């Protein structure tokens, strides 16, 4: 919704082009927290605004914030974010993701954190955007060790989606698509065989 | 022992005293927490007496020999001190009075006359001079900001969520300065920096509709700024203020390579006798601001004169003037509107389209009041006032300007036919005009014509109170007739009923129902301009907003250490004025039905620790915009659901420390940039003070956590600011 300023200085009136249906975000009441812990704990509740990277201008692809949870395994070789135009039907289709080769994501620090990512993608429709964790090692040409080498660490899905692999349609149309946000949980990663059973 | 001495003194023949037969007693008089008291010290059975100055210091010549002096101050237990002094002696004695006798506060705003707080039918919050002094702030709004049930949104006051955010286009709260209406004549807004804070004795905040006595703008409440009484003798006060703004907490937000600062200086001098008194204040301050394009220069002066030709007659004239020149940080930068450094938004930088915006604003208020007590049963007051504002917004496109006047006259009488009855009645007239190139009413928003508009308001009101047993009943009404440019706009009737029931165990109960209204400002009615290519057209047919306001409250003293006040409130608002987009143009219309209901709690406790005072206040607000036109029911914009304030102050001798914490829940809805990230407000203010004789040093660390947030979209709220204030008082 556009908003703008009418009398910019002395009055600073802001006129609004409204209405449209309200977007009432669920409010998290923290009164109890604050009332109990008082002034001292106020510092611990500091959740003010913080820097939020944006998709670069002229960028074609997707950007977003990944909320990172859990403990990064010691055997980590890398973390990647990739996108599939269609959900892979078989283990042999695993390499149909974009972009290829996948850019590595800067490994997050230990503990819960957030990381902003940019993923260059050709224009198109993508059904599965996910984070892939790679264990130290080399992928064999026949993918026979893929199940032990890779884990799905989190994926983008539409709000309310409950399917196993998520239903998060992302469309790139020659520009940057922002706010493709999802959770990466190192304590709840899934083997490839989860999607292509049976698991050995 | 003491009565024996007093009796002995009374029987002693008084000797003629010569200069050689006197001694000097000097020192200080303070309360139990160390705060200076302007107490009186006098010789029992003698004529010598002295009043302490603002620092509590006194000096008294007493007869040599055995002498008893009595120290007293209203609200405190008096103290007798027996001394033996030789002629020519000089003895220092410091006195501590207390504990204080609990006196009920007296307020003057709720019923337009002096009354005990416990007899008021609506909720009233007080900001005392002690509250003001504790904070090293520069304007009245900063001092009132933490009042229970009160919240400021970018300078706009909300009482129980009354106004939301419509800055500059009409406040739904009426500002009074010593009882004189001071809202702007053209926009109806409030200039909080009009009255120097140093001149403020206390602020009374009346919550809920107050149109029964105050008419338009008192839709959500009334804020009355009451200036200091001028003491007898010569007094002077100087104040130096210095402050520093915290740098942005993240390097990527940095916008300048130096530490922003603010500094100010003001002086006050007064002289008073029993017949005539006068005071004068002048000062200025400068601020670099805490964000880009946020510099401000401010100059102000104020004066007050009082003439008391007889004990029954008081004549007061006062004036204040303030001038501001300030850069205008319109909205913060989002990606692509400045050097965003790859960020979605840069809260400390401004949108480049507003670069160079600058404003000059001058405003003044003159008022004169005559009060006369004709008899024990009748007193009257007459007043006249003139408020003037002149602003120019210098912009890259077109400079907008307006010169507005607001003249007011009022005559009021208080009748006390019997001890259990009071009648207040009066008549009031307000005349506003504006000459401007933006509030022209021109149908062509591209034109740069200059026009003049005016608005006349005539009103008569009466409210009576009567005691039936323990119960006080109040009933009143006011009728307002409003003309705009010579044509009738509206006639509005604003009644109010109230009852106060003191009980022995459950405190004092109060209940009230009243109607409030606000006439649309000349700005809302006649604005004609173009904003980002969209024409904004006038609407001369705007009607007043109205509200029915209900309240059930209780004030109780749970113990000598704990006082509480609780109120359930409910307001039904009709014809709320808001801007609407229709057919490619914007116009202000009466569009919204709203409901504001909630709970307003305040608790003040003085724990067992001497010198420690704690306060807790909480407001729950259920603010809904009811379904209208094609809009479904939804949250009313810019109203927080929860407002919690915790405060504590500890005073030991000349040293004091304290702090406030305010939690404001995340706004359910805002009206612009709805999808921007919003966070709750969690603001911690810390303060400390020290007194050395005539000098007082106060320091405040506002927003100590440097919590970064905004409540008005894309407008950064103040960051951590350290302010130090040194005051000298004579």
Image (spheres, coloured by chain):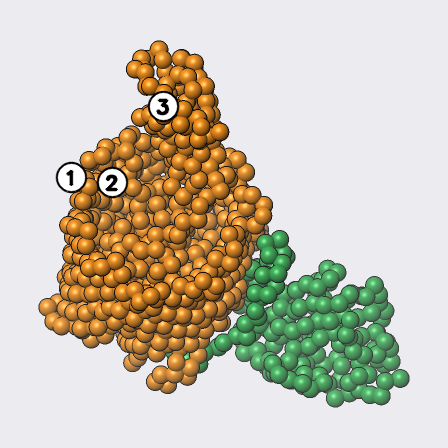
Q: Residue at x 67, y 85 (%)?
A: A162
Res B303 label: 2
Looking at the picture, how far across and down is residue B707, in whole percent? 54, 55
The image quadrant where one finds the C terminus of chain B is top left
Residue sitting nearer the eye, B7 or A53? B7
Res B11 label: 3
Instruction: Say yes or no: labels 1 and 2 on the same chain.
Output: yes
Q: Secondary structure at mark 2?
A: strand
Looking at the picture, how far across and down is residue A158, in whole percent? 61, 81
Tag nearer the camera, 2 or 3: 3
Chain appearing in orange on the rendered image? B
Disc 2 crowd, CA 10 A, few/some/many (<14, 14-19, 20+): some
Residue projecting furthest to the left: B486
Q: Mark 1 = which residue? A: B309
Chain appearing in green on the rendered image? A
Q: Residue at x 45, y 73 (%)?
A: B622
């Amino acid at each position: 919704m556009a908003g703008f300023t009418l009398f910019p200085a002395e009055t600073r009136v802001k006129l609004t082009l409204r209405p449209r249906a309200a977007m009432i975000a669920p409010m998290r009441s923290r009164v109890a927290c604050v009332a109990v812990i008082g002034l001292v704990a106020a510092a611990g509740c500091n959740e003010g605004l913080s820097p939020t990277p944006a998709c670069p201008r002229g960028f074609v692809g997707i950007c977003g914030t990944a909320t990172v949870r859990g403990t990064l395994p010691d055997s980590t070789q890398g973390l990647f974010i990739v996108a599939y135009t269609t959900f892979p039907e078989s283990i042999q289709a695993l390499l149909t993701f974009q972009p290829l080769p996948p850019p590595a994501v800067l490994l997050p620090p230990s503990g819960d954190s957030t990381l902003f990512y940019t993923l260059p993608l050709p224009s198109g429709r993508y059904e599965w955007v996910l984070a892939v964790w790679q264990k130290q090692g080399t992928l064999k040409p026949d993918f026979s060790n893929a199940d032990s080498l890779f884990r799905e660490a989190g994926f983008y899905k539409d709000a309310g989606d409950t399917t196993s692999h998520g239903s998060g349609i992302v469309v790139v149309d020659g520009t940057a698509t922002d706010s493709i946000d999802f959770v990466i949980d190192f304590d709840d990663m899934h083997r490839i065989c989860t999607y292509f059973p049976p698991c050995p | 022992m003491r009565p024996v001495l007093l009796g002995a003194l009374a029987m002693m023949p008084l000797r003629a005293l010569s200069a050689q037969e006197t001694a000097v007693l000097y020192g200080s008089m303070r309360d139990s927490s160390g705060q200076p008291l302007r107490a009186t010290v006098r010789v029992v059975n003698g004529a010598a007496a002295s009043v302490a100055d603002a620092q509590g210091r006194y000096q008294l010549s007493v007869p040599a020999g055995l002498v008893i002096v009595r120290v007293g101050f209203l609200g405190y237990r008096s103290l007798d001190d027996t001394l033996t002094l030789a002629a020519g002696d000089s003895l220092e004695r410091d006195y501590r009075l207390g504990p204080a006798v609990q006196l009920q506060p007296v307020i003057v705003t709720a019923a337009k006359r002096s009354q005990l707080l416990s007899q008021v039918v609506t909720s009233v919050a007080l900001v005392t001079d002690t509250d003001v002094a504790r904070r090293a702030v520069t304007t009245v709004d900063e001092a009132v900001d933490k009042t229970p049930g009160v919240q400021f949104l970018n300078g706009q006051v909300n009482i129980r969520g009354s106004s939301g955010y419509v800055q500059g286009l009409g406040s739904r709260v009426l500002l009074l300065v010593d009882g004189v209406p001071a809202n702007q004549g053209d926009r109806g807004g409030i200039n909080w920096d009009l009255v120097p804070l140093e001149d403020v004795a206390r602020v009374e905040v009346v919550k809920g509709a107050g149109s029964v006595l105050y008419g338009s703008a008192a839709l959500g409440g009334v804020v009355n700024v009451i200036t200091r009484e001028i003491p007898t003798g010569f007094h002077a006060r100087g104040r130096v203020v210095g402050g520093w703004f915290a740098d942005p907490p993240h390097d990527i937000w940095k916008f300048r390579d130096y530490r922003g600062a603010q500094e100010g200086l003001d002086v006050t001098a007064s002289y008073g006798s029993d017949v005539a008194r006068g005071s004068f204040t002048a000062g200025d301050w400068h601020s670099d601001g805490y964000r880009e394009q946020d510099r401000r220069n401010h100059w102000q002066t104020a004066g007050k004169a009082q003439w008391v030709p007889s004990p029954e007659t008081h004549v007061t004239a006062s004036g204040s003037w303030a001038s501001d020149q300030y850069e205008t940080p319109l909205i913060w930068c989002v990606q692509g509107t400045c050097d965003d450094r790859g960020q979605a938004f840069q809260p400390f930088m401004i949108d480049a389209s507003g670069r160079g915006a600058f404003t000059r604003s001058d405003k003044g208020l003159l008022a004169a009041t005559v009060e006369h007590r004709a008899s024990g049963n009748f007193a009257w007051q007459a007043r006249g006032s003139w408020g003037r504002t002149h602003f120019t917004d210098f912009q890259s496109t077109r400079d907008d300007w307006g010169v507005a006047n607001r003249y007011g006259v009022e005559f009021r009488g208080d009748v006390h036919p019997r001890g259990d009855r009071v009648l207040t009645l009066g008549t009031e007239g307000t005349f506003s005009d504006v000459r401007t190139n933006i509030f022209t009413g021109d149908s062509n928003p591209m034109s740069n014509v200059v026009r003049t508009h005016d608005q006349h308001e005539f009103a008569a009101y009466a409210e009576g109170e009567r005691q039936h047993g323990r119960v006080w009943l109040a009933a009143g009404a006011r009728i307002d007739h409003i003309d705009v440019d010579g044509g009738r706009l509206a006639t509005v009737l604003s009644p109010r009923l109230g009852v106060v029931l003191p009980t022995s165990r459950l405190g004092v109960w109060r209940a009230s129902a009243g109607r409030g209204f606000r006439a649309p400002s000349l700005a809302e009615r006649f604005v004609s301009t173009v904003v980002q290519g969209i024409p904004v057209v006038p609407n001369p047919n705007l009607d007043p907003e109205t509200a029915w306001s209900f309240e059930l409250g209780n004030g109780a003293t749970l113990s000598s250490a704990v006082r509480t006040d609780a109120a359930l409130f409910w307001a039904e608002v009709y014809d709320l004025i808001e801007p609407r987009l229709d057919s490619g143009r914007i116009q202000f219309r009466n569009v919204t039905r709203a409901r504001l209901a909630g709970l307003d709690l305040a608790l003040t406790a003085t724990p067992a620790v001497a010198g420690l005072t704690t306060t807790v206040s909480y407001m729950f607000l259920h603010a809904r915009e009811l379904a209208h036109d094609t809009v479904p029911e939804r949250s009313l914009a810019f109203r927080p659901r929860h407002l919690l304030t915790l405060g504590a102050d500890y005073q030991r001798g000349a040293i004091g420390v304290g702090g406030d914490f305010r939690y404001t829940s995340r706004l359910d809805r805002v009206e612009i940039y709805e999808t921007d990230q919003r966070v709750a407000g969690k603001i911690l203010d810390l303060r400390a003070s020290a007194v050395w004789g005539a000098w007082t040093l106060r320091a405040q660390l506002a927003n100590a956590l440097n919590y970064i947030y905004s409540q008005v979209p894309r407008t950064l709220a103040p960051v951590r600011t350290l302010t130090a204030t040194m005051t000298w008082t004579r």
